[in-house]
Image (cartoon, helix red, strand yellow):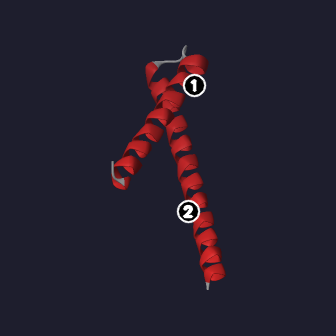
Amino acid sequence: MNSNSKRELLAGLQYLLIGLIAECSVILWFGDRPLAQRLAIWTAIAAALGVVRLIILAFTDWTRKNDWQNVSRRNW
């Protein structure tokens, strides 16, 4: 499996996990609310988790660039 396929598979699994976490949260804590309100809560939770995912990805990319620069400086 090439790296692009692995990356796409991992991204899909991350979004599936975000959806499952949001669904479980809605079922556990907001199960007695009307359907439209539960859907809005689910969307808000999933969006918040998606933003957290993007922040983590940006932070790891930022630290990876710094590490790479430090390694290449050491090799010179």
- Say what amino acid the circle numbered 1 marks: Ser
Frontmost of labels 2 and 1 is: 2
**Quadrant of the rendered image containing residue 61:** bottom right
Element on which disc 2 rests: helix
Please report contact status of discs 2 and 1: CB closer than 8 Å, yes or no: no
Question: Seen from this angle, which residue lies furthest front?
Answer: 75
The quadrant of the picture occupied by the C terminus is: bottom right
- Say what amino acid the circle numbered 2 marks: Asp
Q: Earlier in the sequence, mark 2 or mark 1?
A: 1
At x 62%, y 81%, the residue is 75
List x then y, in percent, for residue 46: 50, 37
At x 59%, y 52%, the residue is 56
Q: What numbered label is drawn on residue 25? A: 1
Name the residue that disc number 2 marks.
61
At x 34%, y 49%, the residue is 5
Using the image, determine if residue 29 lies above or below residue 43: above
Question: Seen from this angle, which residue lies furthest top?
Answer: 32
